[in-house]
Amino acid sequence: MFSERLKSLRKARGVTQKALAASLGLSERHYQGIEYGETKPGFDNLIALADYFDVSLDYLVGRSDNPGR
């Protein structure tokens, strides 16, 4: 669920994987691994992603369907 939600949020913003990775200070390949579910993001990256998309961590990881903070 996390990978699908992350991809959906990114596409809704019209952001490329490369641009998002750069804004998070990650390599494009590392970000791709997170989005494809091959790599588990660290807590710092989860927080950065939630902040970037302005959603709660619970929403980002699929524990809630309410994106609000």
Image (cartoon, rainbow, N blue to C red):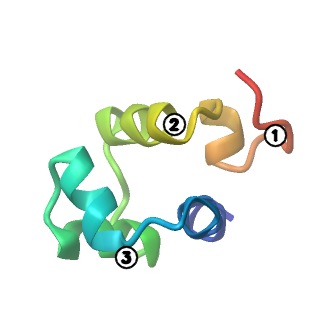
Number of labels in the image equals 3
Q: Quadrant of the N terminus?
A: bottom right
What is the three-letter code of the residue carrying label 3? Answer: Glu
Quadrant for the C terminus in the image: top right
Q: Which residue is drawn at 53% across and 67% down?
A: 14
Q: Which of marks 1 and 3 is nearer the N terminus?
A: 3
Residue 38's disc is 3
Label located before the other in sequence (3 or 2) = 3
User: Label 1 sits on what residue type?
Assistant: Ser
Q: Which of marks 1 and 2 is in front?
A: 2
Look at the numbered disc 1 and give the secondary structure of its residue: loop
- Circle 1 residues within 10 Å: few <14, some 14–19, many ≥20: few
- In the image, what residue occupies the spot 81% across and 40% down? 64
- Label ID, residue 19: none
29 vs 8, left or right, is left
Q: Is mark 3 on a helix, strand or loop?
A: loop
Coordinates of residue 28 in the picture (x, y in percent) = 20, 71
Q: From this viewpoint, which residue is outermost toward the front? A: 14
Q: Mark 2 points at which residue?
A: 50
For this view, does 37 lie left or right of residue 62? Answer: left
Picture coordinates of residue 40, whole percent (x, y): 37, 58
Residue 48 vertical position relative to residue 35 in the rendered view, above or below = above
Q: Give the vertical position of 42 relative to 37 (above or below).
A: above
Are discs 1 and 2 less than 8 Å apart at CB? no
Q: Which residue, given by chain and number where applicable, does mark 1 sit on?
A: 64
Give the quadrant of residue 65.
Answer: top right
- Closer to the N terminus: mark 1 or mark 2? 2
Task: Say which element carries label 2.
Answer: helix
Disc 3 crowd, CA 10 A, few/some/many (<14, 14-19, 20+): few
Q: Position of residue 59 (x, y in %)?
A: 71, 41
Residue located at (47% from left, 31% from top): 51
